[in-house]
Image: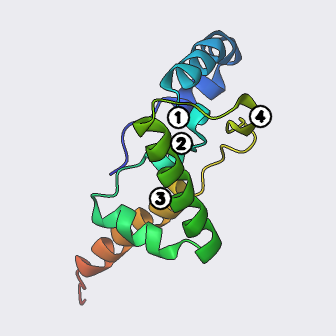
Amino acid sequence: MSAPSLVQAVAKRGWLSKMLKPVSNWYINAAGYRQMGLRADDLISEESETVLAALKRLSPKESYDRIYRIRRATQLSLTHKLLPKNEWTTQEEDVPYLRPLIDQIEAEAAEKDALDTLSVVKN
């Protein structure tokens, strides 16, 4: 499920991070999901078993908030409108809430697979 990431390599090099930060901010604004009140984790596709399991682990409030944001964005998309600027998702609000659960489930699956394929050697 996880794609390769260059985040750690960029974070180690301060000059590269400073150079890519404006590009990153431009891309996030160009994507437009914050202008519809969505968070980045709202864009994760629900088609995999891992994501479905992570969604089941969300608290009821977080699950309700996610559904509300997605429905509101769908309505805005149908009417070809954006939220007023004061209702846009800010960078501080756009924190990962689903990605940590997905990573945890993938780690559990990897551990289970490792334990299932464990072989015992008797001396």
- The residue beneath circle 3 is 103
In the rendered structure, which amino acid carries the disc numbered 1?
A: Tyr
Q: Could you tell me the amino acid type at mark 4? A: Asn
CB atoms at circles 2 and 1 under 8 Å apart?
yes
Number of other residues with Cα within 10 Å of mark 3, as a class: few under 14, some 14 to 19, many 20 or more? some
Q: Rate crowding at label 1 as few (under 14), some (14 to 19) or many (20 or more) other CA atoms within 10 Å.
A: some
Identify the image quadrant of residue 102.
bottom left
Q: Nearer the viewer, mark 2 or mark 1?
A: 1
Q: Which residue is at the front of the view, 113 or 95?
A: 95
Numbered disc in front, either 4 or 1: 4
Asked which quadrant contains residue 58, the reply is bottom right
> In the rendered image of this protein, does residue 50 appear above or below residue 35?
below
Q: Which mark identifies residue 40?
A: 2
**Which sits earlier in the primary sequence, circle 3 or circle 4?**
4
**Residue 92 at x, y percent in the picture:** 76, 40
Query: Is tag 1's residue or tag 3's residue first in the polypeptide sequence?
Result: 1
What label does residue 121 carry, if any?
none
The residue that label 1 is drawn on is: 33
- Tags 1 and 3 in contact by the CB under 8 Å rule? no
Give the residue type at disc 2.
Answer: Ala
Residue nearest the observer in this picture, 116 or 74: 74
Q: Name the residue under label 4.
A: 86
